[in-house]
Image (tube, helix red, strand yellow):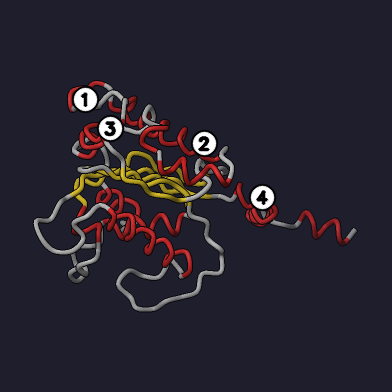
Amino acid sequence: MAAEDATYSKSLMDCIKLQRSSAPQHAATSARIVVCGSILHPASGTGGDLDSIASYYQRFFKRVSTTNPNTSPGTDSVVANQNNEIITGMLLISTESFIHCLEASTAIVLAFLRDLAPPMSQSTPPPDHVPSRRFANLRILLYLDDFPFRSYPFWASRIISDTASTNNSVTATSLQDQLENSISEVCLNIFKMGWSLSKLSKNEVKPTLDELSERYRDLIPSNNSVLALSRCGSILSVPEWLRMFDGRAHLIM
């Protein structure tokens, strides 16, 4: 009887934690975010090529997956991450724009957003800090927290040829008329691509990624569409999101 009483003395939070710890790894609770923006092309200096953007995020995700992403920005402390963080998603880069779907723990997604828009009070970013030197008009198209399943089996990035996309371009006029539908269609197509990649065998992954522009030309948003979304003032920007959800709360009694 004592053992039975101990079983039912658990709190609701204890039950939730127990359920999550016993769930399959693929079903781990994660956050999903879709961010887009325009790409700046510096006239001189390093980081002018598109490959440098993909390389930056390979290093960034390796760092935040092996250290504690909750470490305060700007500090030199490095804390080991014991959670075996899984990062999945897709970064699509075109000549003038990018769109990035990221699926990870809420801590890593927050670290990703903070890195996109460091506070103005922070010291000058280093020359190899891609977000501050290459990105503009950063918009959050979607943010989902506490969902059970991922769309992508891995994280990858590819440079996309805009001529390969057959998607109808989103224009400034169509955005004003059907903003929610335009965003939903772009995000859903990004997720469909992930679901399709999840069905591939290990030997099929690399050739498919190498031909991503052609194989998924009906799902990849055009460069003009992403630019129109990134320039739409009605869509929440990354700095605005951080001020609303990552800033300090001021209680008024």
Read off the residue under disc 3. Answer: 222
| Dot 1 or dot 4, earlier in sequence | 4
- Decide: is 169 above or below 36: above
**Mark toward the viewer: 3 or 1:** 3
Q: Earlier in the sequence, mark 2 or mark 4?
A: 4
Most foreground residue, 153 or 104: 153
Quarter of the image where one finds residue 250: bottom left
C-alpha gap between disc 1 and disc 4:
42 Å
Tell me the element at label 3: loop
Specify which label sits upstream in the sequence, 4 or 3: 4
| Residue 176: numbered disc | 1
Q: Contact (CB < 8 A) between labels 1 and 4?
A: no
Residue at mark 4 to residue at mark 3: CA–CA distance: 36 Å
Q: Which residue is mark 2?
A: 195
Please give the name of the residue rendered at 34% of the width and 44% of the height, measured from the top-left corner: 92
Q: Residues within 10 Å of mark 3 (few under 14, many from 20)?
A: many
* Distance in Å between CA atoms under marks 3 and 2: 20 Å
In 3D space, how far apart are the residues under numbered discs 2 and 4 (Cα atoms)?
18 Å
Secondary structure beneath dot 4 equals loop
The amino acid sitting under disc 3 is Ser
Looking at this rendering, what residue extends furthest in the right direction?
A: 1
Q: Residues within 10 Å of mark 1 (few under 14, many from 20)?
A: few
Residue drawn at x 25%, y 52% as measured from the top left: 50
Residue tagged by mark 4? Answer: 24
